[in-house]
Image (spheres, rainbow, N blue to C red):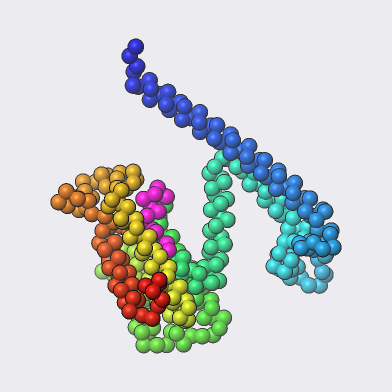
Amino acid sequence: MRIDPAEEVVKKKELDEQNKLKIQKVTRIVALVVAFISTFFSSLKYYFYSERPHSTIRIYRTPFKKGRGFLWNLKRRFLMEKLYNPIGVGLLLLLAGIIAIGIAKFGLVFGALVLGMAVVLPSVYCIVAYPRFGIIVLIVVAYLLFYLGRLGIEGPMGVVADAIRALLILGTLWRLRRNHDWEILKGPVSIIILIWIGYNILQIGNPSAVSRLAWVYTIRSVAIVMFSYFVFVYNIRSIKYVRLIFKVWLGLSLYAALYGIKQEYIGFSAVEDAYLHSDPEIAGLLFIAGHWRKFSIFSDPVAFAYNMSMAATFCIALMAGKFPGWKK
C-alpha cells in the first residue's frame, strides 16, 4: 500500500490543531480552577484568620477619616496598610476574576500579557527609584540582547536597552532635583558632554540635513548614551558597588565563554544554524577555511573576541592582587 506524502502532511496538521485546542482547553480549565481556589482561600483568610488575636497578618477595617482628604485616605489604604483591608481583598478578588475570565476567553496570550505586566511594571519602578538596580539590569540586558533575539523572542530588543537608559536618566534627574545636587553638571568633562549633546540636538534645524529620521537615530545612539555618563558618575559611589558590577560582568563573561565552547565542541543550536544559513553573506563572513567562527551570545565573532579579551586581561590583573588562592 502506497501512502501519499501529502496526506501525511494534512493529517499531521490536523493533529497539531487538535493538540493546540486540547492545550487551550486545559489551560482555561486550570486558570478557572486556580482563580476559584485563590478566591476561596483569600475569603477564608479575610473572614476567619484575620480575626485571631495572634495572627501574623492584620486586616485593617478602619473607615475613611473625614477631613483628611481623599488622596490621603488612598495613601493610607495602599501604602500604609498595604491593601490589608476590605478594599484590598475586594481588589485582589476582582483581579483574580478578571485574569481567570481573560485566560478562559483569550487563551495563553492574555496570560502571557498579565505575566509581562506583572514583571514590567515593578521593573520600571525599581529602575527609576533605585538606579543602582537599573545599572545592573542594563548590563545584563546588554549582554543577553542578541542571545534573546536568537531564541525567538520577537520585538525591538535594542529599544528595550534604550528605554532602560531613559528610565535611568529620569531616575537620576529626579534624585538630583530632590537632593539639589547639581555639582555633577559643573565639572569640565560634564560641560564638554553637555555641549556635545546640545550640538547634536541643534542639528534638527540643520537646513543641509538629508533626513530627519537620521537625526533621530543619531540622538538615540549618541545623546542617550552620553547621558549615561551622568547616571554612572552619580550612582556608582562605593567600592562595594563597583565590586558588584565587576562580579556581574565577569559572571556574564564566563557564561559567554562557556557558551562559545559549547558552540565549538557540541555545535550550534537549531535556531543558530538556521540563522547561519539564512543569508549567503553571513556564511561568507563566518565560514572561513572550512571552519565556522563562533559568536557565543553576541552579535558577531568580533564582539565576542573583544569581550573575552577584556575579561581575560582583567582576570590576569586580578591574579596579582591579594586574594585567597581559591579565588585566584
Q: Position of residue 174 (x, y in %)?
A: 53, 76
Relative side of 130 to 156, left or right: right
Task: Name, please, the residue furthest toward the front.
Answer: 325
Quadrant that contains the C terminus = bottom left
Reply above or below: 19 against 114: above
Q: Magenta region's main secondary structure?
A: helix
User: Which residue: 61% across, 38% down?
Assistant: 28
Does residue 105 appear anywhere in the picture?
A: no
Q: Position of residue 173 (x, y in %)?
A: 50, 77
Relative side of 311 to 26, left or right: left
Reply above or below: 174 against 53: below
The span picked out in magenta is: 140-154
**Magenta segment: does it hold 105?**
no
Write down the quadrant of residue 59 in the picture.
Answer: bottom right
User: Which residue: 34% across, 58% down?
Assistant: 258
Q: Position of residue 137 (x, y in %)?
A: 46, 65
Does residue 289 appear anywhere in the picture?
A: yes
Query: Camera-side residue: 109 or 44?
Result: 44
Quadrant that contains the N terminus = top left
User: Which residue: 38% across, 25% down?
Assistant: 9
Relative side of 261 to 99, left or right: left
Q: Position of residue 84 (x, y in %)?
A: 75, 61
